[in-house]
Amino acid sequence: EVQLQASGGGLAQAGGSLRLSCAASGFTFDDYHIGWFRRAPGKEREWVSCISDSGDIALKAYSVEGRFTISRDNAKSTVYLEMNSLKPEDTAVYYCGFTKAPWRWCKIASRYAYWGQGTLVTVSS
C-alpha cells in the first residue's frame, strides 16, 4: 500500500523559514522523480520544484529561486523542501508528488502517479 505522509507546514512570519518533509512507503522510492507543488487560495496548482530519482538534478520555479531547496534522502524514503525568506505569497497547501515519467516532464502535475495529502503553509506579513 502506497503511503505518503507530508509534514512541516504551519504558520511563519515573512522572512522566516519552514522545512517540509514527505515520507513515503509502499513503493520503490528511488525509482521516482519527486516534485513539490502548491495551491494557493483561489489559484491553480503551481509547480514549485522537482528532484531527479538519484538526487543529482533539481529544478525550481523562478518564484522560489534562491529561497527554496529541494532534497531527498533515499535511505529514509523522504523528500524535503527547505523554505527560507518566506513571503506572504508563499501561503498555500504544499503537495509532494512522485513520478516515473521522463525527467523533462517533472513540472507537469498530470504526469505524477502518487500525491501526498498536502500540508498548509501560512506566511504572515
Image (cartoon, rainbow, N blue to C red):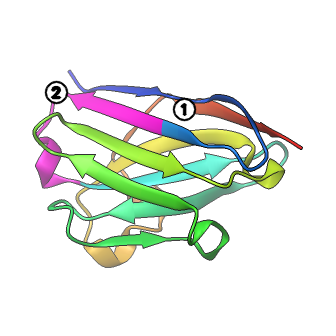
- Residue 1 horizontal side relative to residue 60, left or right: left
Q: Which residue is drawn at the image coordinates 82% and 49% (left, top)?
A: 88
Q: Which residue is drawn at the image coordinates 37% and 34% (left, top)?
A: 22
* Image-quadrant location for residue 74: top left
Inter-mark Cα distance, 2 to 1: 18 Å
Asked if the magenta segment contains residue 73, the reply would be: no
Residue that label 1 marks: 118
Image coordinates of residue 110 in percent, x first then y, are 46, 58
Q: Which residue is drawn at the image coordinates 20% and 21% (left, top)?
A: 1
> What span is in magenta?
20-32
Above/below status of 66 relative to 37: below
Secondary structure under the numbered disc 2 in the rendered image: loop
- Residue 26 horizontal side relative to residue 8, left or right: left
* Image-quadrant location for residue 101: bottom left
Query: Which amino acid type is marked by label 2?
Result: Gly
Q: Nearer the viewer, residue 21 or 86?
A: 86
Image coordinates of residue 51 in percent, x first then y, are 32, 62
* Image-quadrant location for residue 78: top left
Q: Residues within 10 Å of mark 2 (few under 14, many from 20)?
A: few
Query: Which amino acid type is marked by label 1?
Result: Gly
Q: Which residue is drawn at the image coordinates 49% and 39% (left, top)?
A: 19
> What quarter of the picture does the C terminus occupy?
top right
Secondary structure under the numbered disc 1 in the rendered image: loop
Image coordinates of residue 122 in percent, x first then y, are 75, 35
Q: Nearer the viewer, residue 19 or 74?
A: 19
Q: Nearer the viewer, residue 63 or 84?
A: 84
- Residue 9 horizontal side relative to residue 85, left or right: left
Above/below status of 23 relative to 50: above
Image coordinates of residue 24 in percent, x first then y, are 26, 31
Residue that label 2 marks: 26
Asked if the magenta segment contains residue 21, the reply would be: yes
Q: Residues within 10 Å of mark 1 (few under 14, many from 20)?
A: many
